[in-house]
Image (cartoon, rainbow, N blue to C red):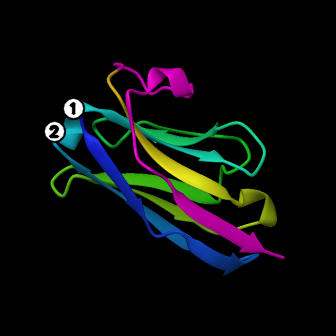
Amino acid sequence: QVQLVESGGGVVQAGGSLRLSCAASGRPLNSYNMGWFRQPPGKEREFVAAIARNGVNTAYADSVKGRFTISRDNAKNTVSLQMTSLEPEDTAVYYCAASSFITVRRATEDYDDWGQGTQVTVSS
């Protein structure tokens, strides 16, 4: 089991940028594919982005493609999500998650360990 702690959330105006970070402890981060998910108010948790162990293979939700970038630093045991051109629809609690699957996954049930989440609010 790996422990995950997100940071970097906050309030930003539409068109602005934020960078979320996820710090892992307990096990080496390179044991996992990593993902970012979000849960907008009143809605279910949804996939945002994922990155493979090697940091090369990535996947994005269509709604964030071209605006968000996921990256990882296995030496520092961290995963990041750079968010640009933010829209009010991006308002949500953002979660970092770890997956033991061999391939990059998009489904919440394919992730074993989750952080506590960080709030991102985009004002119009």
Q: Which mark is residue 12?
A: none
Disc 2, SS: loop
Q: Nearer the viewer, mark 2 or mark 1?
A: 2
Residue 44 in magenta stretch:
no
Q: Is residue 21 left or right of residue 45?
A: left
Tag 2–tag 1 contact (CB < 8 Å): yes
User: Along the line of sight, which residue is nearer the eye, 5 or 71?
Assistant: 5
Identify which amino acid the numbered label 2 is placed on: Arg
Position of residue 80 measured from the top left corner of the image (x, y, whole percent): 40, 58
**Which corner quadrant of the image does residue 100 belong to?**
top left
Magenta stretch in the rendered image: 101-124
**CA separation in Å, label 2 and label 1:** 8 Å
Q: Is residue 62 left or right of residue 98?
A: right
Residue at the spot 55% in from the left edge and 72% down from the top edge: 18
Residue named by callout 2: 27
In the picture, the quarter occupied by the N terminus is top left
Q: Is residue 39 left or right of residue 34?
A: right
Which residue is pictured at 66% across the width and 49% down the height? 65
Farthest residue to the right: give it: 124
Look at 65% across and 40% down and name the residue there: 61
Q: Position of residue 116 (x, y in %)?
A: 44, 50
Q: Secondary structure at mark 1?
A: helix
Residue located beneath label 1 in the image: 31
Position of residue 28 in the picture relative to residue 16 (left or right): left
Q: Residue at x 64, y 77 (%)?
A: 11
Q: How many marks?
A: 2
Q: Please tell me which residue lies in front, 67 or 13.
A: 13
